[in-house]
Image (tube, rainbow, N blue to C red):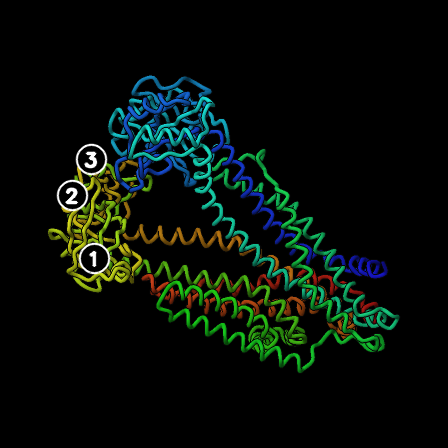
Amino acid sequence: MTVLKTSLRNFFAHKGRMALSAVAVLLSVGFVCGTLVFTDTVDTTFDKLFAVTAADVTVQPHGANKDGSSPQDGAAPLTLPDSAVRTLAAQPGVKSAYGEASSTSVTLVDPRTDKNIGPTSGAPTIAGNWTVEPTAAVKITSGHAPDTADQAVVDSDTAANAHLRVGDQLKVMTGFGTFTHTITGIATFQTTNPGAALVFFDTATAQHELLGKTGAFTSINAYGDGTRTDDRLKAEALTALGHGYQAQTKAQTAAANKSDVASFLNVMKDAMLGFAGIALLVGVFLIVNTFSMLVAQRTREIGLMRALGASRRQVNRSVMTEALLLGVIGSALGIAGGVGIAVGLMRLMNGMGMHLNTGDLTVKWTTPVTGAAVGVLVTLFAAYLPARRAAKVSPMAALRESTGGSSTARSTVLRSVAGLVVTAAGAAGLVAAAVAKQAGQGSALLGLGVVVTLIGFIIIGPLLAAGVVRVLGTVTLRPFGPVGRMAQRNALRNPRRTGATAAALMIGLALVACLSVVSSSMVASASDQIDKSVGADFIIQNPDGALTPDIVKAIKGTPGLGHVTEYKSVPATLALPDGTRSDQTLSATDPTYVTDLRVATVSGKVQDAYADGGITVGQSFADSHHLTTGETIQVTFPGGRAAPLRVDAVTSSKTSLDNGAMYVSLDTARRYTPADRMPQDVMLFATAADKAGVNSAYSALKSAVHAYPQVQVRDQADYKKELRDQMGQLLNLVYGLLALAIVVAVLGVVNTLALSVVERTREIGLMRAIGLSRRQLRRMIRLESVVIALFGAVIGLGLGMAWGVAAEKLLALKGLGDLSIPWATVGAVFVGSAVVGLLAALAPALRASRMNVLGAIATD
């Protein structure tokens, strides 16, 4: 009980310092709990959707995706005949069966603006036939169902976002043309809308516009009458229908759909928890520093306790009890904050078009348990060494002045030697990763090198502080005269404390520098490859699907073009000389593709593959199957026709453009693929008739596709800009998450300075007594903070750039071999670190300047 009372007294005596450490625990635990609550809520939302909308048994053509679409880009939808619906409906135990004609390769356009009104969140636009099924996802709440070919129903969210009402016109673009409909009904989701846009037609219209033929469906939804299990219904359905079909029960459909959502959520969840882990690691330094300084300041007090009979165990327990209180309070606040973070994430996703209802907010019992465990255990771990140090305080310390917890020369030497050894081992790992020949092996070495060098720099932080701070102080603090020299000496007074404080900032800045180098190098490499390899002036794509024949016709009819190259993705099965079979996607193009994209080869020439019976293979594929130029591969095209194709070239793997693509001519693909199985173009390349007319051809192309808002026309400058924008958006997200670690690191600087001010109370009083002004005192503390922050920036940026260089050498194996150091970003971060140090010192400096001089001098 005495230990508990002492712990409580000490805890609340330093509640201001503890509060800053508690904020670090709060932020870290809040991020962990917020991530868990958010992902659990999304799981709940989709579980409800899939449970409500899945049929007892769903039947599809063999090989179709779960949404009924073809697994191949640009390929015609896989269908089953309407006779299959009647066969299934007549099965014993089947109450009803509905044929579904649907497609996700659809673009919705508002005729008033000619703009795409589909989702922007990555969710699909789904078109289908209107049926009144028991598990319908939507219900018409305004107007009526489509009765004729020119009518359509849209979901209420899409209608609201595009300001559409019953009676308005809607343009629908599919792989079989462009169609105009009148909206006759608005349908509302019966569960949460995950962000998709829905449009419905009558069955005949859906078949004609989405499938290109009548009397066919993409799937069948069957419902039992309760006399058979779903598994039995599925087995009997497949037996009745024969070969060429696949089926799933309600549970299997829901599980498969949930798996798709989970694959996205898991990536997001792991990334967010990773950043929470970084923040926790940074928080460890803050807590270690806090308890180390508090123990140092209470050395005489602890010595008195030991002299009065307190055992080492009791002293240790007293400090650990304070840590436990800190962990419990910080974790409790973090758990509550995590719910708020989850709600914020939900609102963010709602703003991006993914509709999540806070009524579905899910807080599982494991979430607070996990948050509390993380917060408490991390806090106890961080406080363990300071607690051991406190337990070793001798009773004789009660008779001595406090030494401030300075370390012995022997321990400093041992720490420095160990740190240098660990750092050297980590550096060796980075070098090994940079020269690795295999990406998998190199990635493992890179990860090991990053972790080990980070640990090494943390260990040798005091050694680095003694040298780097002296240099930084000489360069940056000299203009401030004696005040600057005092600030430098204060930072050097306890190198271990300075190193630990700067290490927290170092971790976040090292990751920023590493990612900046990698992203800048990736953009530079890709841009360089575009300049060197892409000969086409324009690249035309449809992010929502394939390029329909009318789009291709419009582009080929554009004036000012020299040639247009078609690019199709054709599925095929390869029978290889080593006896294996491999399902691959062939790139079927016009012969002009060899000038549109100059592909490097390790043997043979790509243009030879466009002669009769030629094919190219990628270097990795050739190495795996021991293929060389001149060998013959038996290739089976869609529809079952096989052809012996000669390997005319092996393309280099040292590129990021079309890496590993297998090229055949369009003539070869058409010769062995039935016309109704031939995929549509997934991409077009175009070249101006003459270089002087590139700009006019670009404008003409934009005009030619104006009626098709789903089509993107990009020249090489557009392509590079999009690449930079995409990388920039990703980096902004990462930097935003890393900001959490930076905030915790700043709290560490504030805490260290505040405790340092308390520790130097008498010294500050003496300096004020001999003439140091309040303004000079505040400046000294601010400069001390700035030099500590700059020290953290120097070692963090240096370490991060080393990581980035090693990672870039590894990326060179994938063709991204141009190293680019973003010096502007590095410089901005360095200057920003000085600003961070300045801001972190405001409160401690103000408090120091307000001390009573006589009271400070009298402090023991």
Q: Nearer the viewer, residue 506 or 28?
A: 28
The x and y percentages for residue 465 are 60, 75
Q: For the residue carrying disc 2, how many other residues have a C-alpha within 10 Å: few (<14), some (14-19), or many (20+)?
A: some
Q: Nearer the viewer, mark 3 or mark 2?
A: 2
Image quadrant assignment for residue 253: top left
The x and y percentages for residue 464 are 57, 76
How many angstroms separate mark 3 from mark 2 (CA)?
12 Å
Residue at the image position 35 percent from the left and 21 percent from the top? 90
Residue at the image position 58 percent from the left and 43 percent from the top? 37
The x and y percentages for residue 365 are 64, 43
Looking at the rendered structure, the kind of residue marked 1 is Pro
Indicate which disc residue 672 carries: 2
* Residue labelled with disc 1: 577
Which numbered disc, 2 or 1, marks the residue that appears first in the sequence?
A: 1
Q: Nearer the viewer, residue 89 or 595?
A: 89
How many angstroms separate mark 3 from mark 1 (CA)?
30 Å
Q: Is residue 261 visible?
A: yes
* Residue labelled with disc 3: 676
Q: Nearer the viewer, residue 112 or 483?
A: 112
The x and y percentages for residue 511 are 50, 62
Which numbered disc, 3 or 1, marks the residue that appears first in the sequence?
A: 1
Image quadrant assignment for residue 184: top left
Check whether the beta carbons of the residues at disc 3 and disc 1 lie within 8 A of each other.
no
Looking at the rendered structure, the kind of residue marked 2 is Tyr
Looking at the rendered structure, the kind of residue marked 3 is Asp
* Relative height, residue 675 to residue 111 (above, below): below
**Element on which disc 3 rests:** helix
